[in-house]
Image (cartoon, helix red, strand yellow):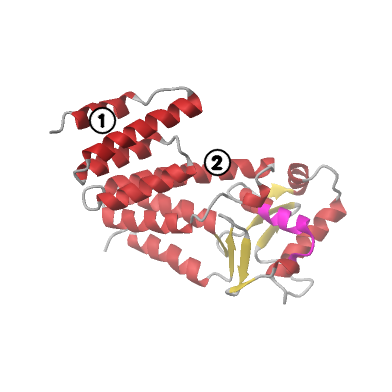
Amino acid sequence: MSEFLPKLLALQNFQANAQIRIETLGNFCVWRNHEKIDSKEWGRDKTIQLLQYLISNRQRNALHKEKIIDGLWEEWNDRDFKVALHGINKVLEPERASRMEAIYIIRQGVSYQIDLEKVWIDVEALEKYIIIGNEALTVDTTISKQAYKAALNLYKGSYLPNRIYEDWTSGEREKMQLLVLGTYITLAEIILKENPLESIRLAQNALAIDATWEDAYRIQMRAYIAKGNRPQAIKTYMKCEVILEEEYGIAPLPETKQLLKEIELIN
């Protein structure tokens, strides 16, 4: 059995059985005990903002309360923070006794963080699937493909799209976009020989996120050649050239031009 299979299965099992699941890609929703939490349960929007801030900073050490407040709100006080935190804990653990410590939001003095061992979050899972895929890439492409596909299945759109103008979401949004773009291309490369049509589809998905992603055009060109469609491969290069000129005023990279030359030499 592959050494990477247990890691993959553990991730899938956590996703299926976690008591709290949070989706942030394309939309924001939280599942408690496999039931979707109604948005009305959250009450104030600032309660949701606090949870989303903790998600966006989940991979850091526990965040000091003052740092959280400074990062989120301009005119907030200690009481407001406590109300928002209480709101999160009440929604996630509606049956918790008042004097019991929260189990999903860990408190260390006046610092707080989400317990990633108990809360499943789509962006965290997506990143872990990609890590498994990357680690297995040179030794077990079957596992790599499974891991990459699992990651891409989680991507349903931009990170917290309703917070697109909030500075504290931009870093995570950009990271997720780059990870997903890279995964589309890597998976497309792995399966290019066995399934060029699927490689084309994956490349198109990447271009739907970023129309200037040049790797995706090269993948499509190679896939069309694999299908014997030389005119479409050349057409893809021309589209790449137009997009790059329109967006950035630049020409395609040397490797893209070289690929075009190779295609033009095909009889």
Image location of residue 50, percent across then percent down:
72, 54
Q: Amino acid at mark 2?
A: Glu
Q: Which residue is mark 1?
A: 259
x 55%, y 41%: residue: 174
Image location of residue 232, percent across then percent down:
28, 40
Name of the residue lying farthest toward the left: 267
| Image position of 150 (left or right of 142) | right
Rendering quarter of residue 5: bottom left
x 42%, y 45%: residue: 206
x 58%, y 50%: residue: 159
Is 30 one of the magenta-colored residues?
no
Residue 191 seen in the figure: no
Q: From the viewer's perspective, is residue 93 above or below residue 120?
A: below
Q: In front here: 222 or 173?
A: 222
At label 2, counting other C-alpha atoms closer than 10 Å, the crowd grade (few under 14, some 14-19, many 20 or more) is few
Q: Amino acid at mark 1?
A: Leu
Q: In front here: 1 or 120?
A: 120
Residue range in magenta is 42-52
Magenta residues: mostly which secondary structure?
helix
Q: Which mark is residue 133?
A: none
> The N terminus appears in which quarter of the rendering?
bottom left
| Image position of 246 (left or right of 21) | left
Q: Which mark is residue 174?
A: 2
Q: From the viewer's perspective, is residue 133 above or below residue 102?
A: above
Rendering quarter of residue 235: top left
Q: Closer to the camera: disc 1 or disc 2?
A: 1
Image location of residue 19, percent across then percent down:
58, 71
- What's the CA distance linking mark 1 and mark 2? 29 Å
Image marks 1 and 2: residues in contact by CB distance under 8 Å: no
Is 48 one of the magenta-colored residues?
yes
| Image position of 180 (left or right of 238) | right
